[in-house]
Image (cartoon, rainbow, N blue to C red):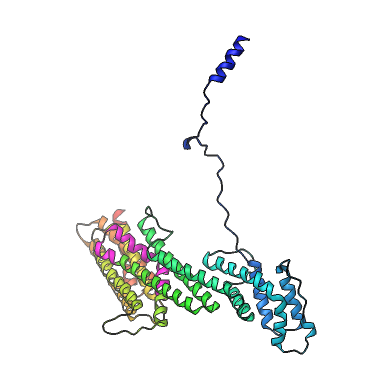
């Protein structure tokens, strides 16, 4: 008995042990973690389909049979406390269409006002503001849903207009916030640890994508008849377009002023996303056509100034590129990867000039396009002559000859990509073949 008593006494007197806390390093990597919440589904998909059908039915000639179709379409949406409507058109044969419409809307208006219109509001906000999609087949476009919403409100003589105003306010606020965020440079695709080239490319592509979203907002507000909000969204779109052109001009001018690796990455990434640049430039030219501002000797319209500054930066960048490429084609020391990067920028500049097809296309683009082609052809001739001279020189310099051969091949590919497959390309190709055979023979 005594050992048992001593054991019980020790147990009572022992201090309570503190609870064990697992340090982060002690947590097993295989421990199941709480998953992220699934994205909320798109609201009002069924109501959107039925609303488009309902608007089509109410726009047509009303008959008792069509009244039955309307009631059958609205039945799944009828709240419990709303009595089941009876088709009033069967007893109104020969009445004018206006009276038939009023009679049919009288029992169905509560369903449209209390169920359909709020769901259409949520549906459009999800698709336009929150950018949600749906995998369901047969879902009408957002413009069709907006047209149906506006038509139903008009048929109800303005009742339910709050749903339209809610959609318009949400689109307008989202557009303003989106433009403010992008102009400040707060893009979700970039961070402090990103590579400068990838970051700049992501920024330019993000700006182009944002402008396309502004186009969707403009179409939506036009469908809803919101003229005041439309003007504000158009202003935000023009503001964002000018910002994108300024970003492109800064990146291109940066390499001309610095010629460092970081500036090279910025200009290379900007021209690499030539499709994004085309979207921005086309939007700017559309803005200039839609908003013709009076220009005089002292004031230049903001949209035109942004485009002119960007094209001036592109012209200065071409001078810098031709200076560096010309020295390399003449035998100067230049890293091969850097040489290829310079040629890619020239190719992108030429593609930008040729693909920008617009009625308001600035004439300087045609001049820059011709200048790029002429100077590339001149460089091709210089490269071929320099290559042949190096092959025939004594003493021979095989390393320099092979370097010039590789650069001549790159210039020939650039000529082909630019569509300059004339005499200059044939002459350069012939010299490249002769030089390659001579170097192979000397090595053998």
Q: Is residue 83 visible?
A: yes
Where in the figure is residue 321, as x and y percent of width and height?
28, 66
Along the horizontal axis of the image, is 376 left or right of 360?
Answer: left
Q: Is residue 55 magenta?
A: no
Where in the figure is residue 192, as x and y percent of width and height?
37, 54
Magenta part, dominant SS: helix
Residue shown at 65% from the left, 78% from the top: 55
Q: Is residue 432 visible?
A: no
Residue shown at 52% from the left, 39% from the top: 29
Q: Is residue 276 magenta?
A: yes
Residue shown at 41% from the left, 78% from the top: 287
- The image shows residue 163, relative to residue 438, as above or below, that is below
Question: In this view, which residue lies farthest toward the right?
Answer: 91
Q: Nearer the viewer, residue 78 or 221?
A: 78
Question: In this view, which residue lies farthest toward the left?
Answer: 394
- The image shows residue 122, relative to residue 53, as above or below, that is above
Along the horizontal axis of the image, is 46 left or right of 167?
Answer: right
> Where is residue 296, by image quadrant?
bottom left
Count all numbered tags in the image, as a single digit. 0
Q: Nearer the viewer, residue 218 or 122?
A: 122
> Where is residue 300, by image quadrant?
bottom left
Q: Nearer the viewer, residue 326 or 308?
A: 308
Task: Write the start and end of the magenta stretch as one range.
Answer: 253-282
Where in the figure is residue 216, as x and y percent of width and height?
51, 72
Along the horizontal axis of the image, is 280 left or right of 124?
Answer: left
Where in the figure is residue 439, as x and y percent of width and height?
30, 58
- Looking at the rendered image, the quarter that the N terminus falls into is top right
């Amino acid at each position: 008995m005594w050992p048992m008593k001593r054991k019980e006494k020790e147990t009572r007197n022992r201090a309570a042990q503190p609870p064990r806390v697992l340090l982060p390093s002690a947590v097993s990597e295989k421990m199941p973690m709480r998953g992220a919440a699934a994205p909320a589904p798109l609201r009002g998909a069924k109501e959107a389909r039925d609303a488009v059908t309902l608007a089509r039915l109410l726009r047509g000639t009303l008959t008792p049979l069509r009244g039955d179709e309307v009631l059958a379409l609205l039945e799944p949406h009828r709240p419990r406390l709303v009595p089941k409507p009876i088709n009033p058109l069967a007893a109104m044969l020969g009445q004018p269409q206006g009276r038939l419409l009023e009679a049919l809307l009288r029992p169905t208006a509560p369903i449209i006002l209390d169920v359909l219109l709020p769901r259409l509001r949520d549906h459009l906000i999800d698709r336009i503001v929150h950018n949600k999609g749906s995998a369901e087949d047969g879902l009408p476009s957002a413009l069709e849903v907006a047209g149906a919403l506006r038509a139903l409100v008009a048929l109800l003589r303005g009742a339910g207009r709050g749903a339209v105003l809610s959609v318009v306010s949400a689109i307008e606020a989202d557009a303003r916030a989106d433009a403010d965020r992008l102009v400040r440079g707060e893009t979700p695709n970039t961070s402090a640890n990103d590579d400068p080239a990838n970051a700049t490319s992501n920024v330019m592509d993000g700006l182009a994508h944002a402008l396309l979203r502004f186009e969707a907002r403009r179409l939506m507000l036009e469908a809803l008849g919101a003229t005041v909000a439309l003007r504000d969204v158009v202003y935000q779109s023009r503001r964002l377009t000018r910002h994108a052109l300024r970003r492109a001009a800064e990146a291109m001018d940066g390499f001309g002023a610095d010629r460092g690796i970081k500036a090279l990455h910025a200009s290379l990434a900007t021209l690499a996303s030539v499709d994004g640049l085309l979207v921005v430039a086309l939007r700017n030219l559309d803005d200039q056509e839609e908003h013709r501002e009076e220009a005089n000797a002292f004031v230049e319209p903001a949209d035109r100034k942004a485009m002119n500054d960007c094209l001036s930066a592109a012209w200065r960048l071409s001078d810098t590129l031709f200076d560096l490429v010309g020295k390399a084609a003449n035998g100067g020391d230049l890293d091969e990867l850097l040489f290829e990067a310079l040629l890619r920028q020239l190719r992108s500049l030429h593609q930008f000039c040729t693909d920008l097809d617009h009625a308001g296309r600035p004439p300087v683009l045609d001049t820059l396009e011709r200048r790029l082609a002429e100077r590339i052809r001149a460089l091709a001739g210089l490269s071929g002559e320099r290559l042949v001279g190096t092959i025939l020189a004594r003493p021979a310099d095989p390393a320099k000859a092979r370097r010039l051969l590789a650069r001549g091949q790159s210039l020939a590919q650039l000529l082909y990509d630019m569509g300059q497959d004339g005499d200059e390309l044939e002459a350069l190709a012939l010299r490249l073949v002769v030089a390659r055979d001579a170097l192979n023979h000397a090595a053998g």
